[in-house]
Amino acid sequence: MRGAACPHPAPGTRPAPSRRRVLAGGALLASLLPALAACAAPAGMRGITLSRQRLNELLARSFPYTRGFSGLADLTLQSPRLRLLPESNRLGTALDVVLAERVTGGRFGGGMDLDYGLRFDAQQGAIRMADVRVNRLDIDPLPPTQRALVAQYAPRVAEQLLADLVLYRLPAEQLALARDLGLGVGALRVLPEGLRIDLVPQGLR
């Protein structure tokens, strides 16, 4: 009597791979997951572009903003007008300025121009101003003594006032979807048409 013949695999099937091949395949798949996640992500999830108009609308929500000067005067910043500076990967903003004296009740108007970089606050899911620099501050007409005081302290006050100001907060559901796909916020790029928020595989940030 013949021994039982080994069963042949059914047509169109292959024998189960060896354990070594399974492990190798798993390692290869794990190495490709970030790239696959990026490819599988919907096109809108690979990055977000905010136009200059949209950025200005978002910025305007934080103004007017008032800060006191040692109890003597109040400095108010208002009516922001944003511009894109792609050559330096920064944003610029012109603001109207009002200086109101508390003792005399006098009010003086002027303007301020500044520029700043951007940083992503992962904990808050927010894009904030960074490295704020005041380039110009004009408040007229002020007496010489007051003009010197404002010129010395107002730019520093404005820079401290605007440091870490939230420009844009990513929607929680958008961040959650990105995390589910293995993506996170990468570069923040100022382009001629707006601000580009790149979403990249988390291991590549």
Image (spheres, rainbow, N blue to C red):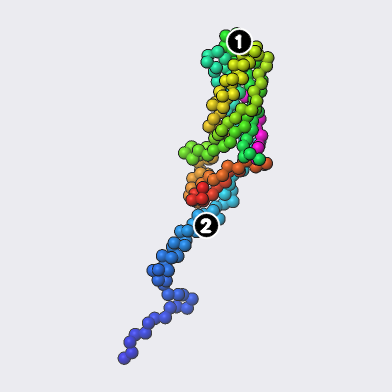
**Quadrant (top left, top right, bottom left, bottom right) of the N terminus:** bottom left
Q: Quadrant of residue 119?
A: top right
The residue pinned by badge 1 equals 105
Residue 46 locus on image (x, y percent): 57, 49
Note whether 16 is above or below 200 in the view shown.
Answer: below
In the rendered structure, which amino acid carries the disc numbered 2? Leu
Question: Which residue is located at x 39 percent, y 69 percent?
Answer: 19
The residue under label 1 is which amino acid type?
Gly
Residue occupying image coordinates x 55% and y 55%? 39
Lower sequence index among marks 2 and 1: 2
Q: Position of residue 91 (x, y in %)?
A: 62, 35
Q: For residue 85: magenta?
A: yes
The answer to which image quadrant residue 89 occupies is top right
Q: Nearer the viewer, residue 160 or 184?
A: 160
Residues shaded magenta: 78-86
The answer to whether residue 48 is seen in the rendering is yes
Residue topped by disc 2 = 36
Instruction: Out of 153 and 96, give the one closest to the viewer.
Output: 153
Q: Could you tell me residue 185's position as x and y percent?
A: 53, 44
Q: Residue furthest top?
A: 104
Q: Residue furthest bottom?
A: 1
Q: Is residue 2 left or right of residue 140?
A: left
Whether 45 is drawn above or below 99: the answer is below
View extreme (left): residue? 1
The prevailing secondary structure element of the residues shown in magenta is strand
- What kind of element bears circle 2? helix
Position in image of residue 145 (x %, y %): 62, 12
Query: Label 2: few (<14), some or many (≥20) within 10 Å?
Result: some
User: Is there any visible trace of residue 194 in the rendered image?
Assistant: no
How far is disc 2 from disc 1 in space, using C-alphas?
Answer: 64 Å
| Side (left or right) of 22 relative to 104 | left
